[in-house]
Amino acid sequence: MTALASISPERLWSRLMELGRDGALPEKGVNRQALSAEEILSWRRIIAWGAEAGLTPSTDPAGNLFLTLQGKFPHLSPVVAGSHADSQPTGGLFDGAFGTLAALEAVTAIAEAGLVPERPITVVAWMNEEGSRFAPGMMGSELFAGKRTLEEVMAVKDATGVSVAEALANVHAAFPEIERRPLGFPVHAYIEPHIEQADVLESAGAVIGVVSGIQGKKTYEFVISGREAHAGTEPMERRQDALQAFARMAVRMQQEMVVDNVVKFTIGRLEIQPNAPSVVPSRAVFRVDLRHPDNAMLDRLGLRLETIAAEEVHPCGLHIKRLVDAPSNTFDEGLRTAIWRSAARYGYPALDVLSAAGHDARQMAPLAPSVMIFIPCRGGLSHHPDEWAEPEHVAAGAAVLLDLLLEQAGLSHNHGDTS
């Protein structure tokens, strides 16, 4: 039988490689951080590719990018699909980019086939999913979902002192011709394709991951306040050494957080002041990333972290800021069944998986039926220049996405190949 629409694996792969030029690192990989000059270049490519298919670009006060294929009934809420375009400072070619370009390819295939869906279909590239330049991440989807305020997000600054508001103004100034829409709108369904960023699928020989949900995450910032002193003259018993307090906390946290083989505990950032060889450190600021799929366990461990910090800080002062508190979520059963159905039609081996990494789909799940489609990435390696997905897996994920978009947007479909 002939499909109503079919993706072009060659075009999708070519575009992934082309997008990798924006922020390309000298050896391999990309540095395309949120609201940067490099991301502006990626917007230009994505908008131009969308225009070839007749998609209308728009953006919002959060700096999210939308490309819409209008439906027969424009007043109906759209089906939204995509991911993000920003990367880590030493990121790969597929994290985020695959999901956004797979959605663009699927919608382009629908447009090229001359199909007009019942409801609009919107491709999205969310602002600052990674959180590498501006922390924490997933700012665009959290603002869209009403989980944070514009005032709070716009005031966040990067390491050079540039605020989100300033960087976003540069992005919007670069695209004066595209529509500025209000923040947030009703969504019929949300679908996010992504590389797995783990090796569960690869180890099982599966091509499609049917994502059941995303494990919970808490992020903390601990600020330890001590007192500067001369390293050669200040007696040990009188010192208010912020780094020593941090060291005590870090050892106990590592010991007490690993309660099972599922928990993920990371101290990923540490700043010391004045950071001088002969000065007792007066200030230590560190961030903790804590994850677990069981929300009750995650809450208990989070409280334990705060207790450990309070017990080990003396004789210094302590301030704790809870940056992220994102419980585990589950995805829509009907959409998960649709992924299984599509994978079976194509003969792609599929597997139920839980996402250990956070994604924008977490914010969308309370707003509309939502789901994620995973494809394998080699060795589970991600956030790294060597991140890699096989071309046939990229095509498979986009083909399954196309099936779901046709179904959710009100178009019947038959099985077709991806050639």
Image (spheres, rainbow, N blue to C red):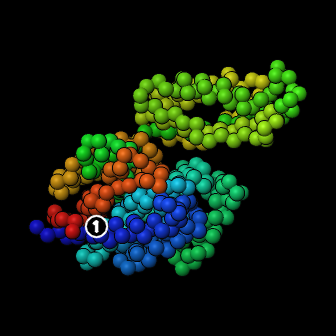
Tell me the amino acid under the disc marked 1.
Answer: Pro
* Residue nearest the viewer, comparing 73 with 373: 373
Q: In terms of image quadrants, where is residue 224?
A: top right
Give the residue number, with chain letter if any, for mark 1: 9
Q: Which residue lies furthest to the right in this view?
A: 233
Apparent side of residue 183 relative to residue 102 in the rendered image (left or right): right
Left or right of 321 on screen, residue 337: left
In the rendered image of this protein, does residue 160 appear above or below residue 266?
Answer: below
Q: Can residue 212 be seen in this view?
A: no
Q: Residue at x 70, y 57 (%)?
A: 160
Q: Nearer the viewer, residue 200 or 333?
A: 200
Q: Position of residue 28 (x, y in %)?
A: 47, 60
Q: Quadrant of residue 395?
A: bottom left
Q: Give the position of the C terminus as an image quadrant.
A: bottom left
Q: Residue at x 35, y 63 (%)?
A: 102
Location of the N terminus by quadrant is bottom left
Establish if 187 lies above or below 40. above
Give the residue at the far left of this rendering.
1
Can residue 250 be seen at all in this image of the molecule?
A: yes
* Rendering coords of residue 213 (x, y %): 37, 43
**Which residue: 82% across, 36% down?**
278
Residue 277 located left or right of residue 248? right
Q: Where is residue 195 in the image (x, y as percent from the top left)?
A: 37, 52
* Residue at horizontal 66 percent and vertical 55 percent from the top: 158
Q: Is mark 1 on a helix, strand or loop?
A: helix
Q: Position of residue 270 (x, y in %)?
A: 65, 40
